[in-house]
Amino acid sequence: MIIEEMQKKGFKKLTGPPEDWLKTFTSMEWGFREKERLKREWDKIQPGDIFIFHSMKPEYISADFLPTGIIGVGVVGEKRIGIDEEAYFEDKNLRPLRIVFKEIWWFGEYEKISTEKFPIKAKKGTDFLIRELYYLLKNCVTFQEMREHDCVISTQGAIQNVSIEKQLRLIELIKPRLREPIIRK
């Protein structure tokens, strides 16, 4: 089970806007810009590495009422260099350093989210995207919960380590939110 793997191997944090996590929902991928620090971090990523997903405030739509926090957990299957097939608000070549997840556990009501690719969703308008994001972000581990359990993660940086002490406390908040994983086909 993923909890045992998280306890044994540890995990890192990925941070991005909810619109990008909605792309990850259908693509099972995450991308980084080709900046020196991000390239160094990306080079270190190995298949089997575990990441928690931190969703920040929206970047491209006005929806400040959406929660921020940890919305899921993913296990890396592979890395590749390529375009972002689901880019809509950004250039497809902006984030060429790609992580492909083999398994993802979303905390939200993901069965209510459309499996259409992100550009199709975005063309349906802001109200549609907000509805999709509402279900994706539902049941997230909030910063208030993290403060109460002394395991607040950094809101900065696209990719960051999480201290062992915080990992153990975060696992206790993550465990009751886990449902069935989505497995890459």
Image (spheres, rainbow, N blue to C red):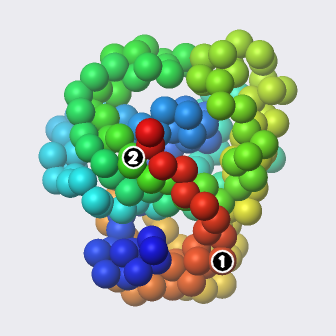
Residue 34: percent from left, percent from top: 24, 30
Image height of 75 relative to 131, above or below:
below
- Judging depth in this view, the residue of 58 and 9 nearest the camera is 9
Residue furthest out toward the front: 185
Image height of 102 relative to 128, above or below:
below
Label 2 neighbourhood size at 10 Å, few (<14), some (14-19), many (20+)? many
- Judging depth in this view, the residue of 115 and 143 nearest the camera is 115
Report whether 179 appears left or right of 66.
left
Q: Earlier in the sequence, mark 1 or mark 2?
A: 2
User: At 58% across and 77% down in the image, what residue appears?
Assistant: 175
Pointers 1 and 2 in contact (C-beta within 8 Å): no
Residue 169: percent from left, percent from top: 51, 85
Residue 2: percent from left, percent from top: 45, 71
Report whether 96 appears left or right of 87.
left
User: At 58% across and 73% down in the image, what residue appears?
Assistant: 174
User: At 65% across and 60% down in the image, what residue appears?
Assistant: 107
Residue 168 location, quadrant: bottom left
- For the C terminus, give its image quadrant: top left
Image height of 83 relative to 41, above or below:
above
User: At 64% across and 65% down in the image, what residue appears?
Assistant: 179
Alpha carbon of mark 1 to alpha carbon of mark 2: how far? 22 Å
Image height of 154 relative to 58, above or below:
below
Pointer 2 residue: 101
* Amino acid type indicated by mark 2: Phe
Pointer 1 residue: 176
* Amino acid type indicated by mark 1: Pro
Helix, strand or loop under label 1: helix
Report whether 135 appears left or right of 53.
right
- For the N terminus, give its image quadrant: bottom left
Report whether 76 appears left or right of 142.
left
